Amino acid sequence: MKPFLQEAESLKTLLSVARGDAPADLVLTGGQLVNVFTGEIYPAEVAIVGERFAGVSTTPGTYRGKQTIDLAGEYIAPGFMDAHVHIESSMLLPAEYANAVLPHGTTAVVTDPHEIANVYGLDGIRFMLQASEGLPIHVFVMLSSCVPATDMETSGARLGVEDLATLRNEERVLGIAEMMNYPGVANGSDDMVSKALLGHGERKRVDGHAPLVGGTMLQAYAAAGVASDHESVSAEEALQKMRAGMQVLIREGSTARNLDALLPLITTENSRFCSWATDDKQPDDLETQGHIDHNIRQAIKQGLDPVTAIQMATINTARHFGLNDMGAVAPGYLADLVTFANLQNIQVSRTFASGRLVAEAGHVIAPLANKVAPPARGMMPAQLTEASFRIPAAGRRARVIVALPDQIVTQDCIAEVKVEDGWALADTGRDILKLAVVERHIGTGNVGLGFVQGFHLNAGALASSVAHDSHNVVVVGTNDSDMLLAAQTVIEMGGGLSAARDGEVLARLALPVAGLMSDQPLGPVRDALLVLLQRARELGCPLSNPYMAMAFLALPVIPALKLTDKGLVDVHKFSLVPLFVS
């Protein structure tokens, strides 16, 4: 992407075409423009030179083109933007991720690579920058602020302000990623204050992550310069954050689905302070649902004005992040656009990125290949045995994590657990299963143990090396032997997902890149994941994606009760707590 106005001759050529004095590289005729500035829709033709729009005219025949495409009445809108995503959570490398989302009209994403950063540190962020360089999708990066998210877990790296500062001035770095340690920010800890200050300045932003935070803590959080939040679960919570000056990123992903709850927030007066985000979206959902286009469709079906929904996917996000030549079909802007036939049910027919047709009829024109080798660093867990998963009964009553469908927040309860011969066991009849988090980065031997409800397994175990944010190995199971087998399978693959029952591995998906991503195309990754989800259902699990739900059981910055390799975390108290209670 060339900086606007950098080259005088290029600008003169653009102006000549804009005046109608010279032919454009491409002219789109017969379309209806969705103008995200005025909210209007009207017939227009669009002229493109290189990677930028030269002009837009309501008079047919204003522009001549070396190539002309007649849109036959289809709508023209800017390319869609995802305001907050972790590409690693797609389990795809950046090029394959682009292959997946470009046909759905996504031409730009703002990504926080803190998943791979928690495994590989700065090398992980550099890898994601390198692997996304030159793709026909704009991949902007926010520097991961919480590696690790807290000191109540073991990650593969630790990034201080000095580390992040080395990447601050990279062209595609837009600021500091979600400040998950919201108590540290609001209470003015030296580390969080220093990182927040890195995000201050021209075209830099500080992203937020403040679930259920309100009152004076929210005011202090916003005062630190935190400019957005994607964690609201109710319209009332989101309104508090908007009133504090934050951009509300309405998330609809594979695990957290907040669109329904937050739509009542949106009004004509405040919609410019709302953007769409996916946060985490897995291969099966990318293929069957789509990406940001899915968020737009769902909102329109529930009554949101289509133009408003499109503005939230385009100009709102661009302006929030200071991308002032993106997010609109207008003279001088980067020529990212989509076309579609039905405004009430938007199905993208063509995607143009930087002036080039890159996807049509649901497929990329020229599939992209991954060309950058990831850091070479394996997993280092301590030796596991069945005894690693045994829980000594220090009482009869224990804290239990309660997983909620389609949410990353959990509830907690205290329940009487099943005890035999001094050991606390899973109780499938009451859906109290065992939960373990195995440290896999530096060989500490840590295994956090607890109980979870909501998975309803009647046999077997599930395991994954995708466990936000430190990405240790998380295991849910009904018995110690199957939990051991599921965990060992993940470790032997160098990372991935598995399902086991009665000493047999039922299904697996290898994720050898940091234990987070596959080096395979979307198709094989999707197919392996679908088999895993089917096996989980056969074991009794009703969750749409238990592996995504498991991934957030180890994230100690999302209320209410979570488990790390160091033990059980009461997120409201932001401290470790004992499993058993008197």
Image (cartoon, rainbow, N blue to C red):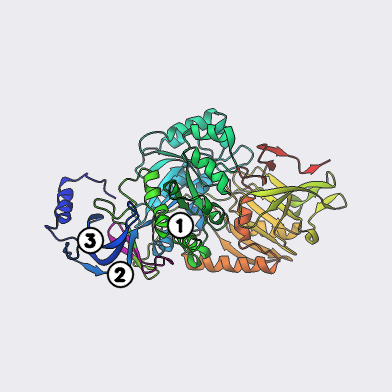
Return the mark for residue 7.
none
Secondary structure of residue under mark 3: loop
Judge whether residue 42 can be spotted in this image. yes
Residue sitting at the far right: 421
Residue sitting at the far left: 21
Do tag 3 and tag 2 residues touch (Cβ < 8 Å)?
no
Secondary structure of residue under mark 1: loop
Q: Give the residue at x 37% y 45%.
A: 319
The magenta segment: 339-358
For disc 2, the marked residue is: 73
Image quadrant in which you'd find residue 310: bottom left
Using the numbered discs, state the Cα–Cα distance from disc 3 to disc 1 in whole angstroms.
41 Å
Do tag 3 and tag 1 residues touch (Cβ < 8 Å)?
no
Judge whether residue 179 can be spotted in this image. no
Relative image position of residue 163 (x, y in whole percent):
46, 35
Return the mark for residue 58.
3
Dot 2 or dot 1, earlier in sequence: 2
Relative image position of residue 114 (x, y in whole percent):
50, 45
For disc 1, the marked residue is: 93
